[in-house]
Image (cartoon, helix red, strand yellow):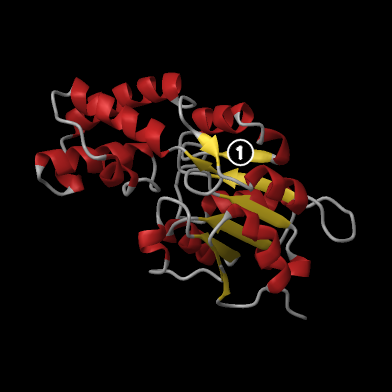
Amino acid sequence: MIRILRPIPVESIKLLVFDLDGTLIDSARDLCNSVNAALEHMGRPHLEHDIIASFVGNGAAMLVRRSLAVENGVPPDEVHDEELATAYTFFLDHYREHKLDFTYAYDGVLESLAALRVLRDGSPRAMAVLTNKPVRPAKAICDGLGMGEFFFQICGGDSFPLKKPDPMGLRSLMGEANVRPEETLMIGDSKVDVQTARNAGAWSLGCQFGFGPQNLMEAPPDLLVDTASDWTTAMSLASIKH
């Protein structure tokens, strides 16, 4: 299903910026396994995967912090810094080794990327990744799954001083691509991505197949799709004259 909540000037969109986890890739199992490995290292029991997956979207450190908070029965901001640092370091080391054990690109992603990188007039459209995942594993995953070639830039949560939903990363990518906010579309699976687009003055497309559909409509995107294969169709249907 494709829902157009607000028509957008598709013919003017020169830059597509994609979230990674829950948008381009299903990385839930590898992320959850690494979180549980860190919890085990800290002498804590494992969490159910659906609980861990619901914490994805605000960066790896927050993912680990929220998981520890659940185990401790406290709010995330009450997790001790030393405990977080130890668990986070273990999580990163484990995830670097196991980031592609079970992670895969969603159906239709590679085909849609190939179709979207060319504008109707035949000129190239700029595409990039902006994720709150650390940049090194983000780049390694994109390359390992054969999608790195589509992006002129892959930026992670440690690429800028501030993470999404702060617009700093998206504005930087717009500057590199030499495009205006109204020529930019952010594609992601959670309200974090929609808020990032709004904060930068860009358009947004929400993916209901990812990790964050439970909060996606808290900040409704301009377009809403059920599969990655719908991206090209959604943009065609959403076109408006301007």
Q: Quadrant of residue 33?
A: top left
Q: Quadrant of residue 63?
A: top left
Q: Closer to the camera, 241 or 102?
A: 102
Q: Residue at x 40, y 55 (%)?
A: 212
Placement of 77 over or under 145, stated as above or below: below
> Circle 1 sits on which residue?
154
Three-letter residue code for mark 1: Ile
User: x and y percent of residue 157 in the render?
Assistant: 46, 40
Q: Closer to the camera, 49 or 155?
A: 49
- Secondary structure at numbered mark 1: strand
Left or right of 208? Residue 179 is right
- Residue 96 visible at all: yes
User: x and y percent of residue 36 in the render?
Assistant: 26, 29
Q: Residue at x 18, y 29 (%)?
A: 83
- Residue 9 visible at all: no
Q: How many marks?
A: 1
Left or right of 70? Residue 116 is right
Residue farthest left in this picture: 73
Q: Few, some or many C-alpha atoms within 10 Å of disc 1 (few <14, some 14-19, many ≥20)?
A: many
User: x and y percent of residue 22 in the render?
Assistant: 47, 47
Left or right of 60? Residue 171 is right
Q: Closer to the camera, 73 or 232?
A: 232
Q: State the quadrant of the N terminus.
A: bottom right
